[in-house]
Image (spheres, grey):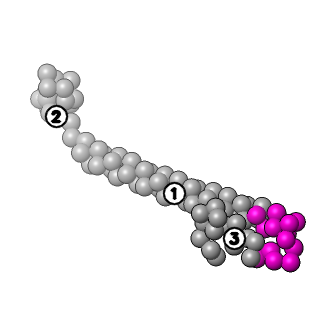
């Protein structure tokens, strides 16, 4: 290494600075692609867990309404979902 911190190689008895810009650019591209892929997978996992939780909550509400008001299940489900701050289907 020289005083400026750059690595050097000997070529014909003279010191030449190393050039690794192509490899450096590829590593940034791979890092960016990996981060993008990780972000997409993370986003999908959050969306998927939200959908599973939403479906499970709706099934719990439907089961409770079936026990309490078997003749008007759909009306009961809609009312409970609206009261909990959700949107009507």
Of the numbered discs in the image, which one, if any, rests on residue 43? 1
Residue 45 makes an appearance in the image: yes
SS for dot 3: helix
Coordinates of residue 21 in the picture (x, y in percent): 24, 45
Mark 3 surroundings within 10 Å by alpha-carbon count, few (fewer than 14), some (14 through 19), many (20 or more): few
67 inside magenta stretch = yes
Cα distance between the residues tagged 2 and 3:
73 Å
SS for dot 2: strand
Image side of residue 48 versus residue 4, left or right: right
Asked where in the image residue 70 lies, by quadrant, the reply is bottom right
Q: Given this view, does label 3 or label 1 mark the residue nearer the observer?
A: 3
Contact check, label 3 and label 1, Cβ < 8 Å: no
Q: Residue drawn 75% across and 72% down?
A: 76
State which tag comes first along the sequence, 3 or 1: 1
78 inside magenta stretch = no
Q: Quadrant of the C terminus?
A: bottom right
State which tag comes first along the sequence, 2 or 1: 2
Q: Residue drawn 35% across and 46% down?
A: 27
Image side of residue 5 versus residue 77, left or right: left
Coordinates of residue 4 in the picture (x, y in percent): 14, 26
Q: In the displayed image of the protein, which residue is found farthest to the top?
A: 3
Query: Residue tagged by mark 3?
Result: 79
Q: Residue drawn 67% across and 67% down?
A: 81
Q: Which residues are magenta?
A: 61-74
SS for dot 1: helix
């Amino acid at each position: 290494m020289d005083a400026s911190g750059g690595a050097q190689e000997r070529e014909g008895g003279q010191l030449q600075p190393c050039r690794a810009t192509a490899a450096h650019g590829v590593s940034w591209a791979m890092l960016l692609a990996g981060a993008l892929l990780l972000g997409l997978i993370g986003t999908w996992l959050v969306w998927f867990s939200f959908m599973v939780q939403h479906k499970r909550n709706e099934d719990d509400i439907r089961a409770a309404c079936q026990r309490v008001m078997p003749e008007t299940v759909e009306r009961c489900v809609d009312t409970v979902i609206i009261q909990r701050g959700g949107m009507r289907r």
